[in-house]
């Protein structure tokens, strides 16, 4: 072997070591650059619809404001369209899983949440539920957490309110399309209401029949119309108008989930006689909420739904756990439940030992200002 | 030279062909895919414009039909058939729905519905009498679906129509070029109003997307167009995957073609090796171990091949091998023969060599003898030339001697006269002079003047006649010695008897003494003149001879004035010429050459002598010199008998002569010609009876350049002359 050859032999290990170090450095940099907390947002992505878009944009706003606050840009939120339909939600979930997500924030309905629960339990993913109040998720020691009260708590608060309203005849219009929510909700409501005669009429909001509804309203006089509907805000507003046209003295009570501008558009003058339960204080009552809505409107050009606030708060809770060193779904759950009370931009989210939240509801009796 | 193997070359050719083909194919595919990609991107904008046009068609058609409904109450009765609108209402005061003309299933609007809080309500407020207003895309109060409202005031009421954008969206989805495309209608502020597919993850679009963007985990190509009726943007999102799917065919196609080419190359190489290279290798191996002495070449033909060329190569090798084997055998036989012949040849060569040596010795001896003979011949020739020269010189000397003899004779006679006669007269002259009367002295003086004067000679008969008459006159006058007086007067140059001097002499008594004295004195003077003339003549001849001899100029090249040279020759030969030959001179001016004058004189002497000989002492010799171009010409013409026809061709041959034996060796003209040639000239002649002309043509003198012409040789060394 020549000296030159020996020289080459000697230099080869150095080159190899250098290459390995370079690769390691590149790998480390790549690992550092890659978002560590990856959250899938399951929501309804429908063009032109504020529902869904509000939630997706809440995530965008959260990430932007987190970056502005000088925190690490190590969280990724990717929206998946579940259409608020159980089958589509399952497909979206599977797609997210195949993309490697194990942290979820959902804004869909209870029906979708119940449909996804077995898969989520099976996969051991951590889910922050922001739009499903079904009791089917309540009281379970699992990785499904919720930063809104469940329907039992919700309906109990509404029942308490209704019980105090004048009049005894209560007409309940229940949407069977969202039975996962409305059926246990009615049960909770009916068991909690006091001193009222309840008349239940089931309808399908997806196949609205106003004439049939009118007949129902005309069958017997009623003092209170409880619109037990989770979506279809326009139709819910129409119920209010219809009820008011038949009985101008009636009180219309909605669920918290109808708090959208669409309700105001269709309810028209009936809003004066309406009560809108809300997870957040009325407009002007809480500067933190007002500030968020103002920031959101400035950023995206429209007023978000209240679920947008839930999503934002849910992301804040997960980020806090992440920033505190939690890495696995179990660590997240442990971190959240150990504290029980987690501060958010809108106050606090309170969790019980099963990860359920019981935040007091606010009854807004003239909700027209909410949508001005 | 390092040579490659055929197999390696074939492999290199295959590899190169394959590489070039693959490169060209890749380039072609890349070009095609690039152009397709560019075309595909350009098509997105066209697709957006197409979608915009479709939206406009929908809206314009709806506008026209809405106008019909607005102005024609009867048409409203058939509103159910106006399918462009999902909902049609008559709205009364207070913005309450007064009459539902057409309603979509599931609509939340009912008769009496208060539209005041809805977008439709706001539109109704804007609508003036007879003017159609549209809303743009909004969420319908009926069912929250994307809708466009049409409103027109008709008196105290309004007509309100709703067009569900989904109806347009369905059509838009239908016209999309690709199934995966998504067509969006986007508000001016960037909000997505409707979409042919939900959930691509974009709710707010930037003002311009710049042809491509990413959303929902996908890459999209974007085409945009304005929709003037909606004041919105139509945006077409086409998954880049569509393009990539299209372009994906190219790598597959390229890979397939590359694999095909590679497979073809492998097959070709394999077949080339098995069918072509292997037989060649086999043939090569057989040839390498083939022993032409012991093996049959036919064994080589056992190489199996499909190729005619390889088979032909093997066959040719077999044939050539057979021929080589035969040729080797023939070569061996011939080699033996050559060896045998060589052995005999060596002996014969030795024998011949000995013979040649002997012959050489003989030749040497003969050569020696020949050399001696040549030397003798040369000496003989030299002697002959010398003899010729001596003969010519003898003749010249004889002539010259004679020429000198004449003036010498004159000198002698004059001297004798002066010595014999003059002393007596001179001795008596004083006494005579003292005894003479003045008249006698005057007559003596007149007689002397007359004797000294030049008088024309009347010729012999004139003198004789004059002598008789004068003698008669003196006799008549009674002179004592008439004959002496007549002879004396005639001696003094008086030839006319009638001259007064004759009368004076006749009358004077001492006329006899006076005439005798005058004659003596005139004779003495005349003798002196003869002496002078003879001396001059002798000096002239001697000078010519000296000029001819030119001992100090012999062999030297000088400028030669040909007339002067010729005149010298004529002087030298005057002795022969003056005996009846008239010499005519015709000398041109500036006829000069550059040469050796002694040799040229020899030429002229020869030619003039020959002319004199040809004329037998009587005739005319004409000597001319003149210039003709760059040549100086000398012609010597005689009126002799001419050169006989039969000898003209031989007169320049050495030793040829027509003269009587002893008068010449026949070398004259030969030498003359050589001399002229040695001066760069020519010597020719023409002859006929009565006229023979020899013409010497020499390069005329024109400065130093002419010097070379006369230095080529010398007449006394003819062996060195050109042509000798």
Image (spheres, coloured by chain):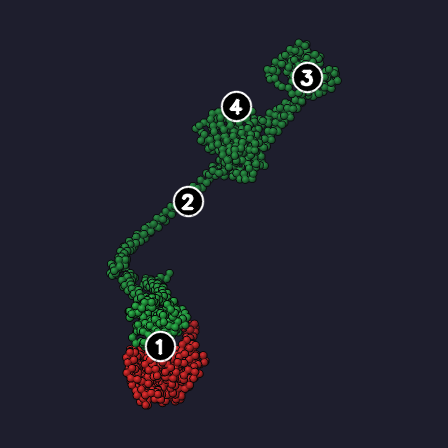
Q: Tag on residue B618? A: 4
- Residue at the spot x=41%, y=78% of the render? A372
Residue B261 vertical placement versus A91 (above, below): above
Mark number displayed over residue B516 = 3
Q: Are callouts 4 and 3 both on one chain?
A: yes
Query: CB under 8 Å between callouts 4 and 3?
Result: no
Both labels 4 and 2 in a single chain: yes
Q: Earlier in the sequence, mark 4 or mark 2?
A: 2
Which image quarter: residue A36?
A: bottom left
Q: In the image, B529: left or right of B40?
A: right
The chain that appears red in the image is: A
Disc 4 and disc 2 in contact, CB within 8 angstroms: no
* First along the sequence among labels 1 and 2: 1
Instruction: Please state if A37 lies on the left or on the right of A176 as rendered.
Output: right
Helix, strand or loop at disc 3?
A: helix
Q: Distance between the residues labelled 3 and 2?
A: 94 Å
Mark 4 vs mark 2, foreground winner is: 4
Residues at marks 4 and 1, CA–CA distance in whole angstroms: 177 Å
Residue B149 visible in the displayed image: no
Asked whether the viewer can see residue B2, the reply is yes
Q: Give the Cα distance between marks 4 and 2.
A: 62 Å
């Amino acid at each position: 072997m020549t000296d030159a050859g020996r020289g080459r032999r000697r230099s080869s290990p150095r080159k190899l070591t250098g290459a390995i170090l370079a690769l390691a450095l590149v790998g480390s940099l790549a690992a550092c650059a890659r978002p560590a907390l990856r959250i899938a947002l399951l929501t309804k992505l429908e063009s032109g619809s504020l529902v869904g878009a509000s939630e997706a944009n809440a995530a965008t706003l959260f990430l932007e404001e987190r970056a502005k606050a000088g925190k690490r840009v190590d969280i990724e939120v990717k929206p998946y369209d579940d259409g608020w339909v159980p089958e589509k939600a399952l497909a979206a979930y599977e797609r997210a899983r195949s993309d490697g997500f194990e942290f979820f924030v959902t804004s869909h309905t209870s029906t979708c949440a119940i449909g996804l629960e077995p898969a989520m339990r099976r996969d051991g993913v951590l889910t922050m539920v922001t739009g499903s109040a079904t009791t089917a998720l309540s009281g379970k020691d699992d990785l499904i957490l919720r930063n809104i009260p469940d329907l039992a708590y919700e309906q109990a608060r509404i029942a308490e309110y209704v019980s105090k309203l004048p009049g005894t005849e209560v007409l309940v219009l229940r949407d069977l399309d969202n039975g996962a929510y409305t059926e246990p909700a009615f049960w909770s409501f009916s068991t909690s209401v006091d001193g009222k005669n309840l008349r239940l009429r089931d309808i399908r909001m997806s196949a609205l029949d106003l004439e049939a509804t009118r007949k129902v309203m005309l069958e017997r006089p009623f003092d209170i119309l409880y619109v037990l509907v989770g979506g279809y805000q326009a139709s819910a507003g129409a119920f209010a108008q219809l009820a008011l046209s038949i009985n101008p003295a009636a009180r219309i009570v909605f669920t918290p989930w109808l708090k959208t501008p669409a309700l105001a558009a269709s309810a028209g003058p009936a809003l004066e006689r309406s009560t809108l339960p809300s997870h957040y204080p009325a407009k002007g009552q809480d500067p933190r909420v007002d500030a968020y809505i103002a920031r959101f409107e400035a950023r995206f050009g429209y007023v978000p739904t209240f679920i947008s606030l839930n999503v934002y708060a849910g992301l804040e809770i997960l980020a806090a756990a992440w920033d505190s060193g939690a890495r696995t779904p179990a660590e997240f759950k442990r971190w959240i439940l150990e504290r029980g009370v987690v501060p958010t931009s809108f106050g606090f989210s309170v969790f019980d030992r099963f990860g359920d939240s019981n935040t007091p509801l606010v009854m807004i009796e003239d909700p027209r200002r909410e949508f001005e | 030279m390092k040579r490659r193997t055929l197999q390696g070359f074939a492999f290199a050719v295959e590899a190169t062909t394959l590489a070039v083909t693959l490169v060209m194919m890749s380039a072609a595919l890349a070009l095609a895919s690039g152009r397709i990609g560019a075309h595909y991107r350009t098509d997105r904008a066209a697709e957006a414009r197409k979608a915009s046009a479709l939206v406009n068609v929908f809206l314009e058609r709806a506008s026209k039909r809405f106008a019909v409904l607005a102005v024609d109450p009867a048409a409203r009765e058939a509103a159910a058939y106006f399918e462009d609108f999902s909902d049609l209402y008559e709205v009364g005061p207070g913005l309450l729905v007064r009459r539902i003309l057409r309603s979509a299933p599931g609509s939340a609007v009912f008769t009496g519905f208060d539209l005041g809080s809805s977008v439709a309500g706001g539109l109704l407020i804007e609508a003036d009498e007879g003017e159609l207003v549209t809303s743009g895309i909004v969420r319908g109060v009926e069912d929250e679906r994307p809708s466009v409202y049409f409103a027109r005031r008709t008196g105290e009421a309004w007509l309100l129509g709703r067009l569900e954008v989904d109806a347009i969206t369905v059509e838009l989805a239908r016209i999309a070029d690709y199934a995966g495309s998504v067509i969006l209608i986007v508000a001016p502020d960037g909000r997505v109003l409707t979409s042919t597919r939900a959930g691509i993850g974009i709710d707010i679009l930037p003002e311009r997307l710049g042809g491509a963007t990413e959303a929902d985990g996908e890459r999209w190509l974007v085409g945009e167009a304005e929709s003037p009726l909606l004041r919105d943007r139509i945006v077409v999102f086409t998954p880049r995957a569509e393009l990539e799917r299209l372009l994906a065919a190219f790598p597959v196609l390229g890979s397939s073609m590359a694999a095909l080419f590679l497979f073809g190359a492998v097959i070709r190489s394999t077949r080339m090796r098995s069918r072509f290279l292997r037989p060649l290798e086999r043939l090569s191996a057989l040839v390498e171990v083939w022993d032409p002495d012991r093996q049959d070449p036919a064994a080589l033909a056992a190489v199996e091949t499909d190729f005619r060329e390889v088979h032909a190569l093997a066959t040719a090798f077999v044939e050539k091998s057979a021929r080589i084997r035969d040729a080797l055998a023939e070569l061996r036989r011939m080699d033996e023969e050559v060896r045998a012949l060589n052995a005999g040849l060596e002996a014969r060569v030795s024998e011949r060599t000995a013979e040649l040596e002997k012959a050489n010795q003989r030749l040497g001896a003969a050569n020696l003898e020949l050399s001696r003979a040549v030397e003798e011949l040369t000496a003989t020739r030299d002697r002959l030339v010398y003899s010729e020269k001596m003969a010519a010189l003898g003749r010249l000397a004889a002539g010259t001697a004679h020429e000198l003899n004449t003036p010498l004779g004159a000198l002698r006679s004059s001297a004798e006269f002066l010595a014999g006669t003059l002393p007596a007269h001179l001795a008596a002259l004083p006494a005579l002079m003292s005894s003479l009367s003045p008249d006698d002295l005057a007559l003596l003086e007149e007689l002397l003047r007359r004797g000294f004067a030049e008088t024309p000679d009347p010729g012999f008969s004139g003198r004789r006649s004059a002598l008789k008459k004068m003698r008669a006159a003196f006799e008549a006058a009674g002179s004592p010695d008439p004959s002496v007086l007549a002879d004396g007067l005639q001696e003094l140059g008086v030839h006319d008897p009638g001259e007064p001097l004759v009368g004076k002499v006749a009358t004077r008594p001492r006329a006899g003494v006076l005439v005798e004295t005058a004659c003596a004195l005139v004779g003495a003077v005349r003798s002196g003149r003869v002496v002078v003339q003879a001396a001059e003549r002798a000096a002239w001849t001697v000078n010519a001879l000296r000029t001819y001899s030119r001992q100090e100029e012999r062999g030297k090249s000088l400028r030669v004035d040909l007339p002067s040279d010729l005149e010298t020759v004529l002087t030298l030969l005057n002795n022969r010429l003056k005996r009846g030959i008239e010499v005519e001179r015709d000398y041109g001016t500036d006829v000069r050459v550059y040469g050796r004058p002694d040799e040229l004189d020899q030429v002229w002497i020869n030619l003039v002598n020959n002319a004199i000989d040809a004329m037998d002492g009587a005739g005319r010799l004409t000597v001319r010199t003149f210039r003709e171009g760059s040549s100086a010409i000398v012609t010597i013409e005689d009126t002799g008998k001419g050169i006989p026809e039969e000898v003209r061709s031989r007169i320049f041959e050495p030793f040829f002569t027509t003269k009587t034996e002893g008068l010449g060796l026949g070398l004259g003209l030969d030498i003359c010609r050589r001399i002229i040639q040695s001066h760069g000239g020519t010597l020719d002649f023409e002859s006929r009876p009565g006229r023979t002309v020899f013409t010497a043509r020499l390069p005329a003198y024109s400065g130093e350049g002419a010097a070379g012409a006369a230095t080529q040789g010398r007449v006394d060394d003819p062996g060195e002359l050109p042509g000798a």
